[in-house]
Image (spheres, rainbow, N blue to C red):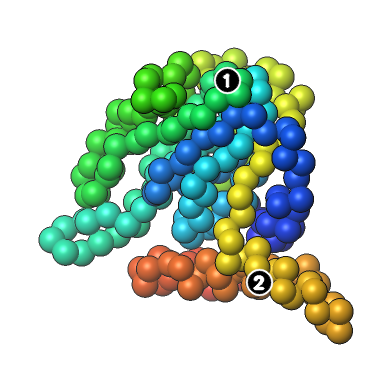
Amino acid sequence: MKLTQFALATILLPLAPITAAQVTMEIPKGIQLLVINGQDSGYSVFGFDHQPEIQLPDGTNQIAFRISKAVRESGSKKTKFKSVPILMRFSGKDTHLKLEVPNIRTLDEGHQFNTSPSISVKESGKQFPFVYDTMAIGFDLAPDFTREVEKYNQSQAIASIATLNTLPTPIAQAPESITKDVANSTTDTSTQITESNKTEMMLKHWFSQADEETKKQFLSWAVTNIK
């Protein structure tokens, strides 16, 4: 994900038309949305960007996500766990759904989940039909999940959608603190906020939300990849 794309999406998402949303899905904490109906969800490279719910159009929808949370590695030591990306497809109309995933507390439990992931979707407490699959990303440290979903859909696998490009744009709630910061900045007529300013603002926000180990890993990656 390019940070400039995320900065722009953060501004545009609240302006999306509400009339297109008919299916609401609750998203549990620890879930990082990656791609919604073929579009980048505006996820953070640090993984601290939880969206409590998303609104989707009636009909067939496809969501790519992963579990991203701090877990216990050994004793009291904690580390960041990111699960294998999961791609889910379902159909609904005028309904409220709830995504449920196991409460992973340790790194071992995370490894077990990656080996045999198990998720569910509920509608009024009852099981709601859906299909899901894992996505093979390989060793790419910064994969383009939108492109990976596109490639997956060309494979005609179980969770693929052939008509994905015709789906309306989903509505997602941008993190409130970021939306306010950008709104406050853009209302100052004496200052022209450039795209780089917005990117810097987003980067600083997500960096402040990360744990110390994640910050160190990011700084090491940044120094290695800076041009």
Q: Secondary structure at mark 1?
A: strand
- Which residue is label 1 attached to? 92
1 or 2: tag closer to the N-terminus: 1
Which amino acid type is marked by label 2? Asp
Rendering coords of residue 157 (x, y %): 54, 17
**In the rendering, which numbered label is found on residue 181?**
2
Question: Which residue is found at the position 75% from the left and 45% from the top?
Answer: 16
Question: Which residue is found at the position 77% from the left and 41% from the top?
Answer: 17
Which quadrant would the C terminus be assigned to in this image?
A: bottom right
- 164 w.r.t. 201: above or below: above
Rendering coords of residue 147 (x, y %): 65, 37
Seen from the viewer's position, the closer of residues 86 and 61 is 61
Rendering coords of residue 74 (x, y %): 16, 58
Quarter of the image for residue 34 reads top right
Q: Secondary structure at mark 2?
A: helix
- 207 w.r.t. 28: above or below: below
- 164 w.r.t. 20: above or below: above
Question: Which residue is found at the position 73% from the left and 58% from the top?
Answer: 11
Question: Which residue is found at the position 74% from the left and 75% from the top?
Answer: 185
Residue 156 makes an appearance in the image: yes
**In the rendering, which numbered label is found on residue 72?**
none
How many neighbours does mark 2 have within 10 angstroms: few (below 14), some (14-19), or many (20 or more)? some
Quarter of the image for residue 7 reads bottom right
Which amino acid type is marked by label 1? Gly
Residue 135 makes an appearance in the image: no
Rendering coords of residue 41 (x, y %): 62, 45
